[in-house]
Amino acid sequence: MTSEFPRTLKVLWGLEGRSTRGPQPALSLDRIVAAAIEIADRDGLAALSMARLAERLGSAPMSLYRHVANKDELLVFMQDAAPGEPPALPPGWRASLETWARALQAVYFRHPWVLQVSAGRPPLEPGQLIWFECGLSVFAGTPLTQRERYQALMATLYFVRGQAHVNTVLLGDTPDAVVGYGELLSGLVTRERFPALAELISSGEFGREEEDVTFDVGLARLLDGIDLLMSTKR
């Protein structure tokens, strides 16, 4: 079975040794991945190339290929390393899940390129799965079934990821881009075509809250829903 795994997973799970070919012991896989993350964090994923990475490391491009076969492999290693260790969790499932969600949000804000990278499959890298393990652990001792725990965690993950995507990818991490949005829409939206949206705009609530407050409110409502589910089982 392990023979079917791609080389990246074999390396990350310790099923295959990391390449040590070549005369440059200072150029390690960890150093390559760290430099690639720095470039992607600072300049975006589009700015990352094997040639630029080699220049950043002061090495010949061919030296990189002793450790990574191509950019696709590099991106897998980057996704594994970028999140770092999950947070220490406080007592209580609600405080723990909130801590987990905010820490995950911080990962996406530090590394927005993570939201743009997809391997076309659920995560298999240990650096990502350790976060999933941490999230699931918050429900230990609760009355939720295993299926309900999975659903609750995935709902939280989707909420955090979606909010981060809007603010880092769609808005370019510039929440000010939505300033005056409600006023602009008020000149376009009519009650005949968009009655619910028009009512919201006229109330003055549309776009009034700051981004972090909106996240707080959304997360609180999500946690309230999980709490309500638990209350039906007590």
Image (tube, rainbow, N blue to C red):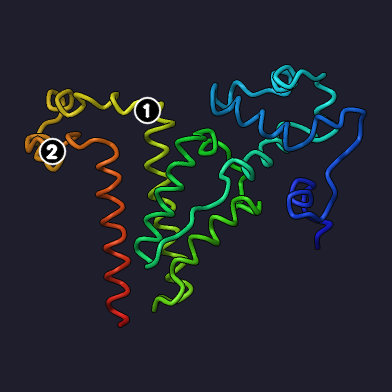
| Label 1 CA crowd tier, 10 Å (few <14, some 14–19, many 20+) | some
User: Residue at point 39% right, 66% down?
Assistant: 91
Does residue 217 appear left or right of residue 183 in this picture?
A: right
Tell me if residue 1 comes above or below residue 78 in the rendering. below
Could you say which quadrant of the image residue 202 lies in?
Answer: top left
Residue 166 picture location, percent across and down: 38, 36
* Residue at mark 1: 171
- Report helix, strand or loop for mark 2: loop
User: Residue at point 15% right, 30% down?
Assistant: 189
Residue type, label 2: Glu
* Residue at mark 2: 205
Residue 29 picture location, percent across and down: 76, 37
* Closest to the observer, 31 or 146: 31
Does residue 146 appear left or right of residue 128 in this picture?
A: left
Image quarter where the C terminus lies is bottom left
Image quarter where the N terminus lies is bottom right
| Label 2 CA crowd tier, 10 Å (few <14, some 14–19, many 20+) | few
Instruction: List the single residue furthest toward the bottom.
Output: 234
